[in-house]
Amino acid sequence: MNEWLDDFKTAVGFLTRLPMPHPEGAMPPNFVRAQRMFPIVGAMIGAAVGLLCLGSRHIGVPDLAAAALALGVGAMLTGALHEDGLADVADGFGGGRDVAAKLEIMRDSRLGTYGALVLLVSFATKLSALAAIPDGYVVQSLIAVHALARGVLPWMAISQPYARTDGLAANAGRPDAATAATAAAFAFAIAWLSLSFVNALLAAIMAAAGAIGMAWLAKRQIGGQTGDVLGGAEQVAETAILVLLAARLA
C-alpha cells in the first residue's frame, strides 16, 4: 500500500505543479513504477478542469469563454508540461534538416514558428470541441480524456527506442510491461466509468491511434522517443478524444 501511495505522490509531483517532496534536482527513484498512476492523476486533472468549465457555464459564462478559462487553468495546473513537449516536437520536426539538428532544436526552450502554429491549432481544436460538449457530459468527458491520454504514455515508453542517450526519457528509465498494462487498465476503467462502453472504447482506440501515429512520426524523424515526443503524444491523444466526444455527444 505504501508503494502505491508513493507512486501516486510521484505522479502528482511530475504531472502537476502541486508541491510534492522529491530529491532536489533528481528523478524520484520510483518514477518508472509511478507511471502506472498516470491515468489516475490525469483523471483528477480532468475532473478539476471539467468542474471549472461546468461551474463557469452555470454562472452564465459563454461556452467558448468557459472552455478557454478551463483549458488555461488546466495548463497552469500541469505547468503546460505536455503542451511544451508538443511545441518542441513541432519546432524540431519542422525546422531541422537532419536528426542532429532536429534534436538540438527540440532542446531549445524558445518557441518557434512551427511550435506556435501547432499550439494554436491544438488549443483552438480543443476549445471548440469542449465548448460543443453538453453540460451533462463535460466533467465525465474530461476525466476520460485526461486519463486515456496519459494512460498510453507507458506503452510508448517501452515500445520505442531512445532518440538520444540523455534527456528526460532516457534518464527516467523504461517501465516494464506490467506497469504499462496497469496504466492502460486504469485508463480504460476510468473511461468506462465516465462514459458509455461504446464511447469509452472509441476514445481508447483514438488515444492508441494518436500514440501510434506520434511514435511512427518520431521514429521516422529522429529515430525514437524523447520526453518531448511523449508530451506531444499526450496532447495529440487529448485533442483527438475531445473531438471524438464532441462529435458523438453534441
Image: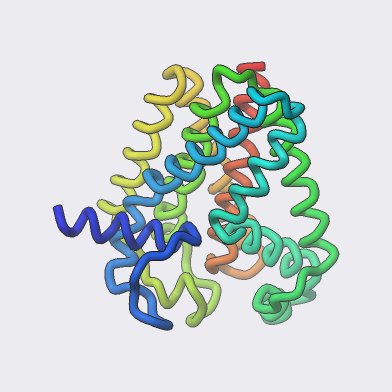
Relative depth, front residue between 185 and 30: 30
Res. 77 in view: yes
Task: Report the front residue among 110 and 73.
Answer: 73
Q: Residue furthest right?
A: 113
Tell me where residue 243 sits by quadrant.
top right
Q: Name the foreground residue: 102 vs 195.
A: 195
Q: Position of residue 97 (x, y in %)?
A: 79, 75
User: Where's residue 19, x and y in %?
Assistant: 42, 64
Q: Is residue 195 above or below residue 75?
A: above
Q: Residue at x 43, y 42 (%)?
A: 44
**Viewed as shown, does residue 29 lie left or right of 43?**
left
**249 on left or right of 6:** right
> Which residue is found at the position 22% from the left and 54% from the top?
4
Q: Quadrant of the C terminus?
A: top right
Q: Residue 37 in the image: state x and y as whole percent.
A: 33, 51
Q: Is residue 90 above or below residue 136?
A: below
Specify whether residue 216 is in view. Answer: no
- Eyeballing the image, is 160 above or below 213? below
Q: Farthest front residue?
A: 59
Depth check: 58 or 247 in front?
A: 58
Q: Residue at x 46, y 55 (%)?
A: 156
Instruction: Give the colouring mode of the picture.
Output: rainbow
- Number of callouts: 0
Q: Is residue 90 above or below residue 139?
A: below
The residue that appears at 14% across and 52% down in the rendered structure is 1
Residue 95 x %, y %: 80, 70
